[in-house]
Image: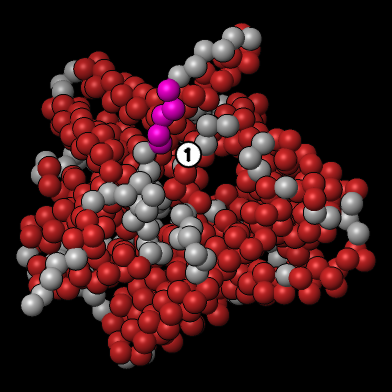
Amino acid sequence: MWSINWERVKEILVYNPDKPLLFNSGLFLFLFTAFMLGYIFLSKHRTTRIAYLTLFSFYFYYKTSGLFLFLLLATLLFVYFSALEIEKSTSKNWKTTWLVLSVIVLLGLLGYYKYTNFFIEAWNSVSNRDFSFHKIILPIGISFYTFQVLSYIIDVYRNQLKPVKNILEFSFFVTFFPHFVAGPIVRASYFIPQLSKEISLSKEDIGRALFLIAGGLLKKVMISDYISVNFVDRVFDQPEIYSGLENLFAVYGYAIQIYCDFSGYSDMAIGIALLTGYRLNENFRSPYQSASITEFWRRWHISLSSWLRDYLYIPLGGNKKGKFRQFLNLELTMLLGGLWHGASWRFVFWGGIHGLLLVIEKALGVTGDRGKSRVKLFFGTLLTYHLVAFLWIFFRADTFQIGYVMVGRILTAFHPELFMQFINGYTIVLCMMMIGYLLHFIPEKIEVKVKKIVSSWPVLLQSLALAISIWIAIQTMSLEIQPFIYFQF
């Protein structure tokens, strides 16, 4: 007789705050496999396909965030009806009123959940008071889906986009599970036209999707998680007990950790979406190969940097109102971009310094173009990487004090004579870091060629390669499944 394992059923159906559903978990692999088996049969009919995807997306968000699903539903309905009101309004003032109301509500919700305690702490430090407030839990993905629906409502207001009349299709656009909780931030103008098209997956598409999923999983689990748990976290927790050499390599380690973590998520999101027949924008383009900070922001978290450009920098005036205004607009954009990442002065500092570097480059005439001089390209890339890596210190450190200690240890307690001892003690960690950097600095031509080769393999061989990647990931996985870094944003 078959017996039902109710604990297993509960694990599948009920949200567990200690075990949110993650792409790099065995439960997601099981659920996605079951989902795809159903999708094969339901994907031929457009409405059924979208309904099935939307229901799974709601379920996926519930499994990551619990009852915050109702906040998502309320946001979704508010934006849906606001866009319709904006379209049918004949008065410019009334359209603007609806836009302003929408922006206030959306940013108000984001501000409440993300920044209330931050502003209270700032007020207490300035006023010398001790005003307290209950701890607010940040809903996973709120920063991403807020920016997504903000761009939608603004595009409707600008008459650059017609609002989606079908609420099922709009729900699908907002909640599509691969990108929903950690990006890429999807533009309605790019995604919504795909809803009316027939799903068509070529052999090359399947190969590319499996390549992205396998590569993203290995970047996240084998490289990012391993060096995080076994080295980077330890040094950032207590930098004062480690030498300057170890602190420096922890900085290098975090630079490749955050890249492999976030780009690994993006790769998996793009690959999973492609398997369902939908395309998402590229989100990373080998950012550490950049020869300037300007170029870095064209390659790092592309969906966010382009959003900040189109919906903040350009509306502020961009570069159309003189040099001073351009510099001010750049600085304001990057300060707010830093604050978007987290409710802390560390993120404001991180964004502000990036803004200052962009201003300096603009003042010096640096355009972000790579140019033809290999010598300039080499030293530009070397300098840009170390500037970015230095700023990652204050992005990652829990406090400014920890960041200062790390910098101090690197400058005053370097001890290069410990290098061989360091290599012997952290051999596997250094190998993982080296693999990460080698993968990152592979020339684009070679990467494209490898993708084409994998895409030409028989589906059975592609599936075998994915299975091997999953096996490797399981073997290198830490005891505790590590959440994605950008889940906290």
Q: Compared to 34, does 187 lie above or below?
A: above
- Tell me if residue 355 comes above or below residue 132 in the rendering: below
Residue drawn at x 84%, y 51% is 410
Q: Label 1: few (<14), some or many (≥20) within 10 Å?
A: some
Report the label total: 1
Q: Disc 1 on helix, strand or loop? A: helix
Magenta: main secondary structure: loop
Find residue 82 and report its image quarter: top left
Magenta-tinted stretch: 134-138
Relative depth, front residue between 357 and 159: 357
Q: Is residue 424 above or below residue 73?
A: below
Which residue is at a point 33% across and 84% down the rendered structure image? 463
Residue at numbered disc 1: 308
What amino acid type should be assigned to the residue bearing mark 1? Leu
Q: Nearer the viewer, residue 241 or 227?
A: 241
- Identify the image quadrant of the N terminus: bottom left
Can residue 354 be seen here? The reply is: no
Q: What residue sits 26% from the left and 34% below the top? A: 71
Q: Position of residue 231 (x, y in %)?
A: 67, 61
212 with respect to 371 (left or right): left
Determine if residue 110 is in view.
yes
Query: Eyeballing the image, is 93 above or below 255?
Result: above
